[in-house]
Amino acid sequence: MARIDIHTHAFADKIASHALESIMSHMPEKYWTHFDGRLATLVSQLKAHSFDHAVLCQIATKPEHFAPIMAWSSAIRDGAFGEDAARMIVPLPSVHPADPDYVSRLGEVAKAGFKGVKLHPYFQRFILDEPHVLDYFRAVRDAGLFVEVHDGFDIGFPFDDFCGPRRILNVIENVPGLRFMVTHFGGWLAWEEASRILIGQPIDIEISMAIGFCEPAKIKEMLLRHPEDRLYFGSDWPWSDYDVTLPFLEECGLPPSRMAALMGGNAARWLGLPTP
Ligand SMILES: [Zn+2]
């Protein structure tokens, strides 16, 4: 069975330390990562923990970041960072919702063979269900892409509701047919609301950054209650450690078919990857 991490981040060697420093300057020290955030480190971590693939989420914090992110995504895929990275890493480019050319840019992403785009409402400064963002999501759908979106609060920003569980539901209801990958169990540090209105529904949800932040019993309860074919393992590496998350999940003692679906079976289907 495939083992897939559907939510990671990594940076080119040249910018990794600067990128991490600038992100972490928003965060209290206890949330700082002890990994260096380099692509090569991610690949070696994946191999050490028997992962077949990882989705590499990128965030265009300004519209003009589209081109360099596309170039780096293509370089990874085409082997510029080695065969392991080319085989294992599934890059998601990012098209900023405020980019006036977002329709053609989404078309470029699809034409280049990438499967989706990643958004982060806090870093990109938008509210998830505002009308112009719903139009953006319609364009994502019409380009044949999926979207993976940061959901819930973010430690680096004030706790204003940009992308909480209720807004996720609004998007899903208003953009039928959109392939929407919800992150952080439906809402980081909004666990109770997410649990009440999203968990158990036919919604695709990955589980990153819950372990260590949400009550263990609550995590296990949500892992058992959500539809088995809609659950995805994500880490948000480098902000979590496989040596913590993987043993926790083993100890949850999920039924084997549910565990296999969570750890990669569902993601292989979502990404259209062959299951080894
Ligand atoms: Zn992330």
Image (cartoon, rainbow, N blue to C red):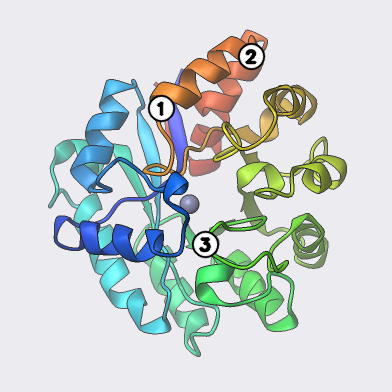
In the displayed structure, 83 sits above or below 73; it is: above
Give the structural element (helix, strand or loop) at label 1.
helix
Asked whether the beta carbons under mark 2 and mark 1 sit within 8 Å of each other, the answer is no
Q: Which residue is mark 2?
A: 252
Marks 2/3: CA–CA distance: 30 Å
Left-right relation of 84 to 238: left
Q: Which residue is mark 1?
A: 242
Left-right relation of 44 to 214: left
In the displayed structure, 219 sits above or below 249; it is: below
Give the structural element (helix, strand or loop) at label 3.
loop
In the displayed structure, 32 sits above or below 274; it is: below
Marks 2/1: CA–CA distance: 15 Å
Q: Indicate the position of residue 1 as horizontal and vertical percent values.
A: 46, 17
Q: Which residue is mark 3?
A: 156
Left-right relation of 59 to 220: left
Mark 2 neighbour class, 10 Å CA radius: few under 14, some 14 to 19, many 20 or more: some
Kind of residue at badge 3: Gly
Q: Would you say residue 87 is visible in this rendering?
A: no
Asked whether the beta carbons under mark 1 and mark 3 sit within 8 Å of each other, the answer is no
